[in-house]
Image: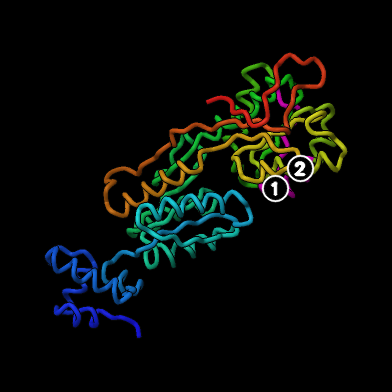
Amino acid sequence: MKTTLQHIAARAGVTKATVSYALSGKPSVSKEVRARILAIASELGYQPHITARSLSTGRAPTLGLMFESIANPFYPEFALEIERAARARGHFLLIGNTDSDPEVGRAFLDRIAGPLSAGVVAMAGSLHVEDVKRVAARGTPVVLCLWEDVGHPPGTPCVTVDFGRAAELAAGHVFALGHRRIGLLVAGGANEMPHARRLEGFRKALGSVGVRPVAVEVARRDTVKDGRDAARRLLGTSVGVTAVCASNDLLALGVLQAAHELRIRVPDELSVTGITGISATKLAWPSLTTVEVPVGEIARTAIDMLVDLVEHRRPGEAPFEVVRSPPVLVARESTAPLAFGRRNTPTRPGQREGK
């Protein structure tokens, strides 16, 4: 039989209302009575009805996380960090996968944000900023996470990391290895360029040493398949490319596939770098040089911001935070000094560079 408030009240010798006040933490119950009620509730295995409690308190006990595609291995890895951070703040997590469909994102916010979650962490790209502001206007906090344009805050609570700096580290790394004929591969589409900041970083690093990229190829989506297709175009039309800097790890893994299909040896004939640092970079053959972003710190910062907003600890303008830990380049087996005219000492696989 399921334990109810009435069972606890009868056992404790108090009213049902007193039990409800004690379990919800209201100050009208003495410490001694609350302690007795909590002990009895634990002994009887009482489980509160989540929906009923959210209706009575006006606040759901969970937080939401919304991202574009669970097929992208970055998001499950990030979700794990978000879940740990939420649990550390006393919350459980609801996860929504929009499948890159803004309508699904809007539906998630409308049906989950508020009724079932006290607030939502939404990954940039999973919905439009206007939708975030609309939900926030009705009283449910939404924190936009991994907004890439550091110089232009979106006007809504936001956490970001400097992906431009990450791209600079990647391009600077292959330049230091002697490469001058460098191709760039970025994710984009007909109407948007989600990795525009990373493209700027590549160009900034190369421009500072007087190098222009041999070619810039755009992959339709940030998937391994699209990275492979774009890399085949880049390597098939641009003569003499000795290094490719990809704007994320999935595209870079696609470059490795394309190089294998075209019988281009990595890293002997072609060096390849990625960005983000997903676990698959360690398992690739050869293992992928990448620029890791501080996923754990990003997750903790986003959850701390969201919980503070839920608990009304962040009055005033929408907070905008850039995580303190910088991206870090991890050199592995996919990059090596240029085969001819070596002028630099190679970085040992696994060695970290540049902060």
**Is 56 or 142 nearer to us in this picture?**
56
| Residue lying furthest bottom | 1
**Is 46 or 147 nearer to us in this picture?**
46
User: Which residue is label 1 attached to?
Assistant: 220
Lateral position of residue 256 relative to residue 112, left or right: right
Please check the rendered image and state whether residue 225 is part of the magenta-colored stretch, yes or no: yes
Q: What amino acid is found at the position of numbered circle 1 in the picture?
A: Arg
| Residue 163 in the image, given as x and y percentages of width and height | 55, 35
Crowding at dot 2, Cα within 10 Å, few <14 / some 14-19 / many 20+, comes out as many
Secondary-structure class at tag 2: helix
Q: What amino acid is found at the position of numbered circle 2 in the picture?
A: Ala
| Residue 270 in the image, given as x and y percentages of width and height | 79, 30
The Cα atoms of the two marked residues, 1 and 2, are separated by 8 Å
**Residue 219 is drawn in which quadrant?**
top right
Secondary-structure class at tag 1: loop
Lateral position of residue 41 relative to residue 283, left or right: left
- Scheme of colours in the image: rainbow
Crowding at dot 1, Cα within 10 Å, few <14 / some 14-19 / many 20+, comes out as some
User: Which residue is label 2 attached to?
Assistant: 230
| Residue 189 in the image, given as x and y percentages of width and height | 66, 46
Please check the rendered image and state whether residue 22 is part of the magenta-colored stretch, yes or no: no
Name the residue at 59% across, 37% down.
196
**Residue 40 is drawn in which quadrant?**
bottom left
In this picture, is 285 found above or below 27? Answer: above
Name the residue at 64% across, 40% down.
248
| Residue 346 in the image, given as x and y percentages of width and height | 70, 21
Circles 1 and 2 in contact, beta carbons < 8 Å: yes
Name the residue at 67% across, 16% down.
210
In this picture, is 309 found above or below 4? Answer: above
| Residue lying furthest right | 263
Q: Which residues are magenta?
A: 212-231
